[in-house]
Image (cartoon, rainbow, N blue to C red):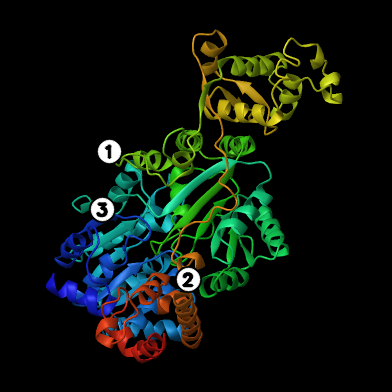
Amino acid sequence: MSRALSILKEVFGYPDFRGQQAEIISHLAGGGDCLVLMPTGGGKSLCYQIPALLRQGTAIVVSPLIALMQNQVAALHEIGVRAAVLNSSLSLDEAVNVEQGLIQGQYDLLYVAPERLLTARFLNLIARSQIALFAIDEAHCVSQWGHDFRPEYIQLSVLHERFPAIPRIALTATADLHTRQEIVERLGLDTAKIFVSSFDRPNIRYQIIDKTNARNQLLNFIRAQHRSEAGIVYCLSRRKVEETAAWLSEQGLRALPYHAGMSMLERGQNQERFLREEGIIMVATIAFGMGIDKPDVRFVAHLDLPKSIEGYYQETGRAGRDGQAANAWMVYGLNDVIQQRRMIEESVAHDRFKQVATRKLEAMLSLCETTTCRRLRMLHYFGEAVEAAACGNCDVCLNPPEVWDATVEVQKALSCVYRTGQHFGVGHLIDVLRGNPTERVKQWHHDRLSTFAVGKDQPEKFWRSVFRQMVAQGLLTTDSEGYGALHLTETCRSVLKGQQPVFLRLQTKSQRASERREGVTDSVLLSAAERYLWEKLRYWRAKMAKEHGVPAYVIFHDSTLQELVRLCPQTEDELRLVSGIGVRKVDKYGSDLMAILRSA
């Protein structure tokens, strides 16, 4: 481990290991198999990159995304590590050269797509080469019940079957207990040591608010808290992605779309801009994001309800990978619940899959409607026993919601659903409750019902919140025909009979638009001299990134620039003490940095 620590300091530029990194590296470097669950930004890559440099031969890294492979290899080249990719982005001649390099032992790490690895040609190539270890990144893709299932991942057990003596490490940031068991079973990791780090991302602030006018709410959020900063906005449909990106652009923001319906060329160009340029907002479906190694994403916003807590955690985890303050923001309404339930019911999947999907959606709804700390709720979902107090960094902690006895109002709403024949959606039901004599209400003679106008003392927004929470609690469900009509469930019987009270949450007030997240880059926290140095370092970094053809964060993370501003080292020996600056980068950029820092 003394060699490992030396590599960590001299090559990667970090003074100490974090969490379980040292134990994982020691186990893998010693020839043991392991499964690693570690949150995004927790340093998973180092867990196999350092053993790759400690062991003889080449480490084969299985990764599902071409962009991720290329960026990781570019970052490794910057610090002097011999690495290459082998995927469909290479020409035939380039691929042959990489294959020859593998046989000749020219690489410390080789990143390979699972489709390429499973070919007979590549498996034979491995057999002729000296292999240090196998690393299977994004291992949750093996789960058929998961949100990122990749069929090729199921076949990766072939590595253990054909090369049992070569150690393997499977890594993921997102896996509940069921998914962990599936990873172990399908990858043949029965004797592997399992390392589970905390799923907590304390730098991320979670906020879920009522959906009223989603676009305007999003715009106000970005302008108030993340002006000119990089972020991701997730939408459920391709059409909504296109429309939202276009609308944000019209409002003067730098927004780009990304979804599976776009050409591969266009998707690639937009992703490249997002990675290389600063302040880009990517509006995307969940087709975008897995493995995106961009550390300075300052916010992730959801305009539609995710299908599961796993999906929500994975997507929000793309914010704040550098450990700096970031926001996970979502608007959520009754139509989101109806839409997700409809998608499950209309799915051609077998009943077992629908049951699992329904259970995961119910857990997601519970997170949205919780009256206790959202962070603790998520950690408990992933099986993490947390005895700590509430986090103090989610909207529920910052603005605790009131809970009220809504039994009478819920009974009125349930009675209205029953008396209208269980054939109508929430809009019509609210019109009946509030006594709005619309043409449709008159057409169906619903103005003659006993429930007509029994809720006239409350506004439409109030009743929408009541109906949404009733659906979330399972008192109502939607029809299977896809028209959004609400139906009573068996659960509501005891409520209607007055045998069971119902408590609902009053919505928390939205954060003040003027409220800013705290961060070192905020001009309020920097003196004039520090702000000058910060901008000068960022300008230099952008110039270097352009010259080298890599994203700016490959040169240095924001956190490293912030350390340079804070410490302002004046010698190369002092420069080596800054986190994120290894020997290779001191040799490469030391003179430039010294000139900038001394001038400050």
Q: Which residue is mark 2?
A: 67
288 lies left or right of 104: right
> Which type of secondary structure does the marked residue at label 3 adopt?
loop
Q: Quadrant of residue 374?
A: top left
Q: Which residue is mark 1?
A: 387
Using the rendered image of the protein, determine whether residue 149 is visible from the camera's viewpoint. no
Q: CA distance from mark 3 to mark 2?
A: 28 Å
Using the rendered image of the protein, determine whether residue 485 is visible from the camera's viewpoint. yes
- Residue located at (28% from left, 39% from top): 385
Say which quadrant the N terminus sits in.
bottom left
> Which type of secondary structure does the marked residue at label 1 adopt?
loop
Q: Which residue is mark 3?
A: 188
Query: Which amino acid is tagged 1?
Result: Glu
- Residue located at (26% from left, 61% from top): 169
- Camera-nearest label, 3 or 2: 2
Q: CA distance from mark 1 to mark 2?
A: 39 Å
